[in-house]
Amino acid sequence: MGNRRRLLFLAHRIPYPPDKGEKIRAWHILDHLAGRGWEVELGCLADDPADLDHLPALRARCAAVECHLTGGRLRSAARGLWRLRPGMPLTLGWFHHPGLHAWAGRGLAAGRYDAVFVYSSAMAPYAMGEAAAATARLAGRRVLDMVDVDSEKWRAYAAVARAPMRQVFAREARALLAFERRAAPGCIATCSRASARSAATRPSWSASSSARTSFPAASSGGSAWRASAGAASAPT
């Protein structure tokens, strides 16, 4: 592989085929980075067994693909409730898969990756904790794409919902926002496709990191890893 560098790309949905919003964004980012010389190793989740039919297309573009079925909405919901703790959002349990977590953890602990791209705050736990701490050389080489900023989405749901779901959604918004604040400082940048946020919400997750980053070609040295202040945007 020569000087090609290895990138861990974590996505909460299998990014292929790019047939709807979040998949379109994830696929084009992944495809772009692979085209810039990154040896991409993809870790992702799939809701529908039929999604696994698309793994050959992903493996043709990625150096490795680790995809796990969530078991559907009911099983995901049960998993979220089982892992629920005071102050923790349901989202993290919903998107937790022990097999994928172990796979990502082994690679991070072994220093396998030169960089990490986390697609959706729901996937941030896979790149946090003891495994991530063991790879100090990744400091400044982690990007968190919050996509729609899920805490803001739940806040919007709560604003129009009736009791008791209003309280459920409001709790999820608060807990997820607190988690986003913890996850963002470990990354060189956070980015989002949301074009409008309240002034009160925006600094809550971006204060510790830039809202825009330029993801370098794989041949770039550490000096290419820099973030500049600016409007929220997808990596270029």
Image (cartoon, rainbow, N blue to C red):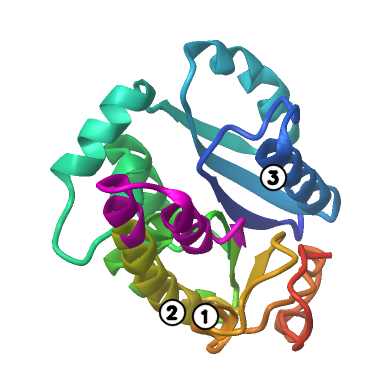
Is residue 195 found left or right of 46 in the rendered image?
right
Name the secondary structure under disc 3: helix
The residue stretch that appears in magenta: 146-170
Quarter of the picture holding the C terminus: bottom right
Residue at which label 1 appears: 139
Give amino acid for label 1. Answer: Ala
Determine the residue positioned at 25% across, 42% down: 80
Q: Main secondary structure of the magenta part?
A: helix
For the view shown, which residue lies furthest in the front direction?
162
Is residue 116 found left or right of 130 in the rendered image?
right
Task: Work out whether 164 lies above or below 206.
Answer: above
Q: Where does residue 123 sit, x and y in percent of width and height?
A: 45, 52
Determine the residue positioned at 52% across, 80% down: 139
Asked if the residue under mark 2 is in contact with the one under mark 1, i.e. CB atoms within 8 Å, the reply is: yes
Residue at which label 3 appears: 26
Residue 92 at least partly seen: no
Residue at which label 2 appears: 136
Q: Where does residue 195 sit, x and y in percent of width and height?
A: 75, 65
Q: Where does residue 166 sit, x and y in percent of width and height?
A: 33, 52
Asked if the residue under mark 2 is in contact with the one under mark 3, i.e. CB atoms within 8 Å, the reply is: no
Foreground disc of the pair 3, 1: 3
Disc 3 versus disc 2: distance between alpha carbons? 26 Å
Give amino acid for label 2. Answer: Ala
Name the secondary structure under disc 2: helix
Name the secondary structure under disc 1: loop
